[in-house]
Amino acid sequence: MVDPWVGRSLRRVEDPALVRGEGCFVGDAAVRMHTARFVRSTVSSGVIRSIEGPCYTAADLDAGGVGDIEAVLHRPNFVKVRQPLLARRRVRFVGEPVAVVVGRSPEEAEDLADQVVVDVDHDEEPLVHPHDSESNAVVEAELATEQIERALHEADHLVEVVFTSHRQAALPLEPRGSTSEYDRRTGRLVVRASTQAPHIVRTAIADLLAIPEADVQVVAPDVGGGFGQKLPLAREDVVVAWLALQRRGSVAWIEDRSENLTASWHSRDQVYRVVGGFTDSGELQALDAEIICDVGAWSCYPFTWGVEPLMAMGEMCGPYKVAHYRVRTRGVTSFRCPMAPYRGVSRPVITASLERLMDTAARRMAMDPVEIRRRNLIAAFPHTSVTGMTIDAGSYVESLEKAAEYFDLGEFRHRQSEARKRGGPLLGVGISSFAERTGYGTPVFASRAMGVTPGYETVTMKMDPSGYVEAAVGASPHGQGLETTLAQLIADQLTVDVSRIRIVHGDTDRTPYGWGTFASRSMVIAGGAAHLAAGRLRERLAQVASAVLEANADDIVFSGGSATVAGTDIGVPVAELARIAHHHTERLEEGTPVGLSVEASYDPGGTFSNACHIAEVEIDPETGATRVTRFLVVEDAGRLINPMIVDGQIRGGVAQGIANALFEEVVYDEDDNILTASLMDYLPPTAAEIPDIEIRHLETITDATITGAKGLGEGGTIGAPAAVLNAVSDALGHLDLAMNEMPATPERVRTLIRSSENAP
């Protein structure tokens, strides 16, 4: 019996070319193309009086019949706006594209951009979209259970936390960019874009430029990180495509780091006011939340500016049993860069708010932080949340208990006590328990009433005459290792060596329509479709084997790369079956399909992974500098297809979560001018700031997915900020201080310490 491929820590097949410097990114395709350079607004709000210089403007796009971007939610209290590709009449944030120039080289394009003069009357207009809305609140929603007021009134303890998350940027290693080439022979447009969703880009370009989708090919080559920032449509990509059509040639746009920080999507500028109604025994009976999300100047297509505030409303209860719930959420526009999903979307803030509430309640009631969580975590499955979500089997209590055991909190408390006696650095520990909704398809997205409903994934699979398998997927990985893990799933179904499987992705001409890679969905949904397609291919092979071996197809057994008749040693290699299926169809029974090509789609309702994080920090009370000295993750993501890739996803997510908690912040002044437009001011951590991340796994096999796997790509980023901020608050607890704000920069921590009468 050959060991299954699933569960092995295989090295990623994607890596050799990348580590040898042989990857192919958008910038590699831009060589020898004409260069587009965008002229961007230097003021946050104002009326455009004139644009002069060697450039294209919104007027040129309008004359060419180019459409506006329109992101839609079909729900009450949602304001729909039409976004021009280049600013028309008004500018609404610093960095908004106003005009575009084209040069024969990047240097010439830069010089041409410097020649463009944009005259803008800066004004004090309070409304971001005065012609579309009477206020800056563009999406509002509320939800309340019948007995919420009574439950809050009867609670033994009302605990309130006001939590602030300051604006962040995804900061992918490779900024955005695209190239467009017009093929004069075919009249087609070939677009190469650094995107997470090539099919969405193709549809949008075709719609806005009023050309058939068949005339547009979008290719996502190697992509140097996305984290959500490369998921929504980039208006610049459409402009570059239009330029290529107009000029009947090739045009490239490669974003620089300043543009990326200034004009690409931001995220998580949110304030939560959370009130928990607890019993004397620490049970959370009622939860009342008020949420305000700054959504920036424009809505992101196709997810809209409702993506952060509405997620916060639906998933606010997290991993906890809550009987009574009320939430009011608003998305409010501002004269700042637009917002889009960033790894975890609103869940890092949801989790930080909830976990700060738990620690605050535990402190007020003199309870152990582990115990108050144990009493409130969901323990019986399936669980229907107060918002109507069905939560499948998990290990919420078990992950908490295992994390506490592995970490040895008793030993830490002894070290903390001794450190306080000695003076010097302040030690703290923080816990974060959370659930991550993953792999949800059309059933969930349909309830959001978007103008576009994403969800399903499709895989087309074929075996060639040599017995090699090609699987084309609509998902578009950009570092997740999907080429490796999907091959493992398929290899087990067909019992062939994993090296005989090729995964094709990121090319709209070669792949079925799909929704890309985001929301911890690819292994669940694309993996499910691959599993189904491989099963169908296996059935086709069994039909061929039954004819060759003169046996019933139900008696064909696959093992070790061969098909045999059950209970005998009579068999034939799978590669030989492939040859027969293509070259000797006369040997097959009448009615057997020719060739070995199949297709399958998968569209699940979703599954929840869960984890518990524990962080230990050390704070210098003189400077406020915080150092994470230990970080433990106990994760349950169901069946692990490739444990090594899983651990890599967790470690990368935790690193971003630590960055969110302590370092990274997009800062604007009172006039909405961005102050963090370079890496001199926007502070990502280095390897020196990230500790070794200890990982332990639990494995709850769910029946909510066909493979038993759950998504986990966002989990590290969701849970880490809460653990770190709880640790900071724990370190300052003897001073009666708490950190309810992120990032907890040295300045904020130092200011907080100095505010205490008990400060050292």
Image (cartoon, rainbow, N blue to C red):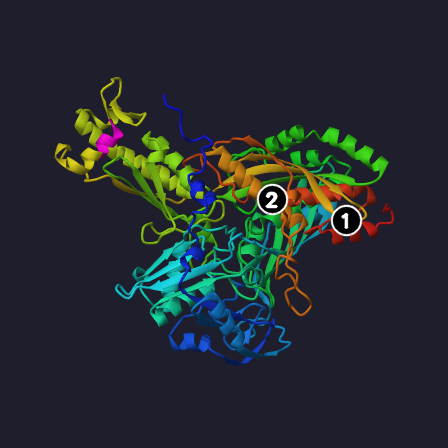
Q: Is residue 102 visible?
A: yes
Near mark 2 (Cα within 10 A), the count class, few <14, some 14-19 or many ≥20, is: many
- Front position in the image: 377 or 99: 99
Q: Amino acid at mark 1?
A: Gly
Q: Residue at x 63, y 33 (%)?
A: 400
Q: Amino acid at mark 2?
A: Ala
Q: Secondary structure at mark 1?
A: loop
Kindly indicate the quadrant of the structure image that contains residue 526.
top left
Kindly indicate the quadrant of the structure image that contains residue 284.
top right
Quadrant (top left, top right, bottom left, bottom right) of the N terminus: top left
Label 1, on which residue?
624
Label 2, on which residue?
655
Near mark 1 (Cα within 10 A), the count class, few <14, some 14-19 or many ≥20, is: many
Magenta segment: 573-578
- Front position in the image: 412 or 497: 497
Q: Is residue 199 left or right of residue 431?
A: left
Q: Is residue 457 left or right of residue 380?
A: left
Q: In the picture shown, does residue 159 fall above or below 557?
A: below
Q: Residue at x 30, y 38 (%)?
A: 469
Distance, label 1 to label 2, CA atoms, is 20 Å
Q: In the picture shown, does residue 46 fall above or below 504?
A: below
Find residue 254 and report its horizontal and vertical position in percent: 48, 61
Find residue 429 and report its horizontal and vertical position in percent: 72, 38
